[in-house]
Structures are given as C-alpha cells and as structure tokens.
Amino acid sequence: MDNSALTCIDFPAQSTGIVPDDQACFQIWRELGMPEHIRTHSLMVARIATRLAEWADQRGIAVRVQEVRAAALLHDLGKAYTITHQGNHSHIGASLVMDRTGNPAIAQGVIHHVRWPGELDLDRHFLPLAVLYADKRVVHDRIVTIRERFQDILDRYANSFERMQKIYRSHAKVHALEKLLEQSLEVDLYAYPFDRRGVVQ
C-alpha cells in the first residue's frame, strides 16, 4: 500500500469522529489486551503530550487538549497485536484507532509517533508532533532526555546500518522539534519536571 495514502502529511488530518475521554481509552486498552507495561508507558507519554497541548492552547495555537491526550494514550495500541503476530505497530495502531474512533487526527498521531516525515509546523500539525516528542521523552516508565531515549532505541533496534541511519535522522528531527517547541511554548523542556520528581538527570 502507498504509505503516503496513510500519512496525510501534506495537510492536517481532520478532527472528526470521536474524541475519547480517558475512561474510553482505558476501555479500548482492556478490549485489545494492552499489556500493563505498555499502559504505564502510555500514561507517561500522555502526561507530557497533555502538558504540551495545555501550553499550546494558552499561547493561541489551535489544539484540542483531550484529542492530543487521547492520541498519546492510544499511541501504542498496536503493540499487543505485534507482540504476537509482528508487523508495524504504529500502522496497526492507527488502523485500530480509526476503527474505534473514526478520528483521522488521532490516527495521524498514532501512525507518526515513531517518525514524522513532514515539516515541523506546529500550527498545522501540533497533535502528531506533540505525541512524537512525548514518546521520545519516555523509556518504558521513565521520563528521560531525548539523547537517552535514542540511545535506548539504538540499543534495541539498530540491527543494520540502514536502520541506524534512520534512527539518527529521526533523532536530528526530534532534536529540532524540541527547540521549536521550546521557542513556541516559551518553556525549557529539558528542565521542566513532567514527572513531578524534579529536573531530568
């Protein structure tokens, strides 16, 4: 299948269909058998993405906070399937989200939480970029720096030179995204204690 047909990077995905609240997201987790450790990771990612969305809303960026939060809570929805059957968890998760919510904006956040192939434009693509950034700040259940997160990704997934190159390109883009978020939201993301336990070490 043509990947461009799935990604919709040339224009913001439409916010239509359902925007599930937390309890609805948790019910989807239960129905699809999401493992406990992935639920914990998703909650941490949602904490960061939600805070980013709140700051964006305060600064006049068009964003629906609960929609960003729902995308973050559901970003690893495809993991349970791929643990058993393999496959691309972000694509499978996006398909499951479309089936459950009918909301392309949330599905776009899910399909692009691993890698964003488009321009870093917060006004047009805040939701997927927020979920991508939030995911790159969490290793399992710990909030870490981008550098630590990508080291974890390299350790687990850089099993070929091509894969390693993709990871490094993604790291560069997320680093640029962090700088853009800091400028636009007027916050030091490295210093902000998303986990409420103090500055990331």
Image: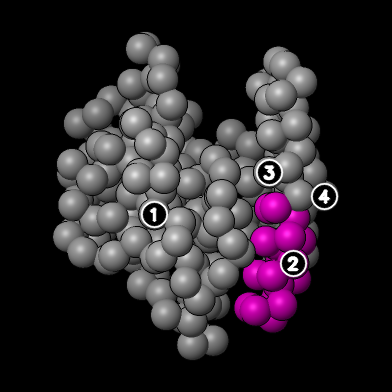
Q: Label 3 to label 1, Cα distance in Å?
A: 19 Å
Task: Say which residue appears at 68% left-offset and 53% top-offset.
Answer: 174
| Rendered image quadrant of residue 149 | top right
Residue 94, position in %: x, y? 33, 41
Q: Label 1 to label 2, Cα distance in Å?
A: 24 Å
Q: Is residue 185 magenta?
A: yes
Question: Which region shows up in magenta?
Answer: 173-190
Residue 192, position in %: x, y? 70, 66
Q: Is residue 165 left or right of residue 31?
A: right
Residue type at the position of mark 4: Gln
Question: Which element type, helix, strand or loop, lies under badge 1?
Answer: loop
Upstream in the sequence, badge 3 or badge 1? 1
User: 197 or 40: which is nearer to us?
Assistant: 40
Q: Is residue 12 magenta?
A: no
Residue 22, position in %: x, y? 29, 54
Residue 98, position in %: x, y? 23, 45
Q: Label 1 to label 4, Cα distance in Å?
A: 36 Å
User: 6 or 68: which is nearer to us?
Assistant: 6
Upstream in the sequence, badge 2 or badge 4? 2
| Quarter of the rendering occupied by the N terminus | top left
Q: Which residue is mark 1?
A: 8
Q: Which residue is mark 4?
A: 201
Q: Which residue is mark 2?
A: 179
Q: Which mark is residue 170?
A: 3
Question: Which element type, helix, strand or loop, lies under badge 3?
Answer: helix
Camera-nearest label, 1 or 2: 1
Task: Say which residue appears at 17% left-offset and 60% top-offset.
Answer: 17
Residue type at the position of mark 1: Cys
| Rendered image quadrant of residue 87 | top left
Task: Say which residue appears at 73% left-offset and 60% top-offset.
Answer: 176
Camera-nearest label, 3 or 2: 3
